[in-house]
Image: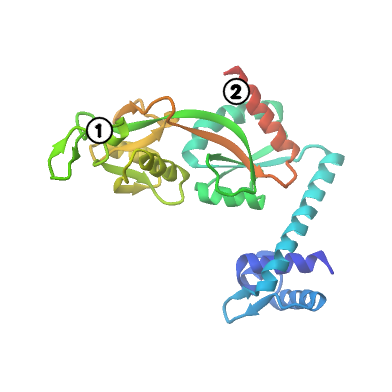
């Protein structure tokens, strides 16, 4: 059995298509099909049901390809660790981050890291939380900055920072009224957040981890937010709040201090979010990634 056969078959599995896998691997499709057929004969098992436009893994194929994934990951880790043992630190480092979060936390880290390791080129990968988890699992990123909780149990985490959350409300507009069962409006005696249970909420779109944080927070306070608008930018959300279009919950680091700006109401010392560095726990963590974590530790201790 050749590792190349496993690599080809696993790429077909990932892409769900022989055509797409051939394009990705930059090989001719007939050659790719022949290599996968050799693997199937070697294993004595059919890995895919080949359709006109898709390749669907059989039940047995799905199980066997999970072993292929492990073998390929071990090969890659072996090559990376051996290369670093003989040649020193890898010259590239991929860091995944949500765009706004990265814009606030990465610049001082990148400055400090570049001062200590100018030979390492850092590549920033900006994606949604959902994508960043997958990129960390697949090893596309060496480290990804994510907020707890993390859904994928294959990821290891290192604490980065914990910050308070704030409720952003429009200036001069009072939403602190809730409707009773008879339709009358009364001021609530509950928590600050539940005081705004009937207010229109401005939320991040699906795929952004902070959306789940806000939904869970609202559920803890006994209500489901009435979503008026969705956006992919927390900056846009704050501008919309400033213009009276609703309320939103934001992390401390992104608060705005220039016009137009909302009013920020504290939600209490226990209402926080924690950011972490995440990476696949059973993969080799490169020397560059370890060095970056050390720089973060030094910066955090100084501040």
Compared with 21, 276 (above or below) is above
Q: Residue furthest bottom?
A: 52
Q: Which residue is mark 2?
A: 300
Callout 2 environment at 10 Å: few (<14), some (14 to 19), or many (20+)? Answer: few
Q: Residue furthest front?
A: 181
Callout 1 environment at 10 Å: few (<14), some (14 to 19), or many (20+)? Answer: many
Compared with 296, 20 (above or below) is below
Q: Residue furthest right?
A: 86
Q: Nearer the viewer, residue 192 or 159?
A: 192
Q: Residue at x 43, y 45 (%)?
A: 212
Residue 166 seen in the figure: yes
How far apart are the alpha carbons under marks 1 and 2? Answer: 34 Å
Q: Quadrant of the N terminus?
A: bottom right
Q: Quadrant of the C terminus?
A: top right
Compared with 28, 182 (above or below) is above
Q: Nearer the viewer, residue 144 or 239?
A: 144
Q: Label 1's element?
A: loop
Q: Residue 110: x percent and y percent?
A: 61, 31
Q: Residue 136: x percent and y percent?
A: 62, 48
Q: Label 2's element?
A: helix
Q: Residue at x 17, y 45 (%)?
A: 181
Compared with 53, 267 (above or below) is above
Residue 26 seen in the figure: no
Q: Residue at x 22, y 33 (%)?
A: 188
Q: Which residue is mark 1?
A: 170
Viewed as shown, does residue 223 lie left or right of 102?
A: left
Q: Residue 294: x percent and y percent?
A: 69, 28
Which corner quadrant of the image does residue 210 belong to? top left
Viewed as shown, does residue 71 lie left or right of 99?
A: right
Which corner quadrant of the image does residue 192 belong to? top left
């Amino acid at each position: 059995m050749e590792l190349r056969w496993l690599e080809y078959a696993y790429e077909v599995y990932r892409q769900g298509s022989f055509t797409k896998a051939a394009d990705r691997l930059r090989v001719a499709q007939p050659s790719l099909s022949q290599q996968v057929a050799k693997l199937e004969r070697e294993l004595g098992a059919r890995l895919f049901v080949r359709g006109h436009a898709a390749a669907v893994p059989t039940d047995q194929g799905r199980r066997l390809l999970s072993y292929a994934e492990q073998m390929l990951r071990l090969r890659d880790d072996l090559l990376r660790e051996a290369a670093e043992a003989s040649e020193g630190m890898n010259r590239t480092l991929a860091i995944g981050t949500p765009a706004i979060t990265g814009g606030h936390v990465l610049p001082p880290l990148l400055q400090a890291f570049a001062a200590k390791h100018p030979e390492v080129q850092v590549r920033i990968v900006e994606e949604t939380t959902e994508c960043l988890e997958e990129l960390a699992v697949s090893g596309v990123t060496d480290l990804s900055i994510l907020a707890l909780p993390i859904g994928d149990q294959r990821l290891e985490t290192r604490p980065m920072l914990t910050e308070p959350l704030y409720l952003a409300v429009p200036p001069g507009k009072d939403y602190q009224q809730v409707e009773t069962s008879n339709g009358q409006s009364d001021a609530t005696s509950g928590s600050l957040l539940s005081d705004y249970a009937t207010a229109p909420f401005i939320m991040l779109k699906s795929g952004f981890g902070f959306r789940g944080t806000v939904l869970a927070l609202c559920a803890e306070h006994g209500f489901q937010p009435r979503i008026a608008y969705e956006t992919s930018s927390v900056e846009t959300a704050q501008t919309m709040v400033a213009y009276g279009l609703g309320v939103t919950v934001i992390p401390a680091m992104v608060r705005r201090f220039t016009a137009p700006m909302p009013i920020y109401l504290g939600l209490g010392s226990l209402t926080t979010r924690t950011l972490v560095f995440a990476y696949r726990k059973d993969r080799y963590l490169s020397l560059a990634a370890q060095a970056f974590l050390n720089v973060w530790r030094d910066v955090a201790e100084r501040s």
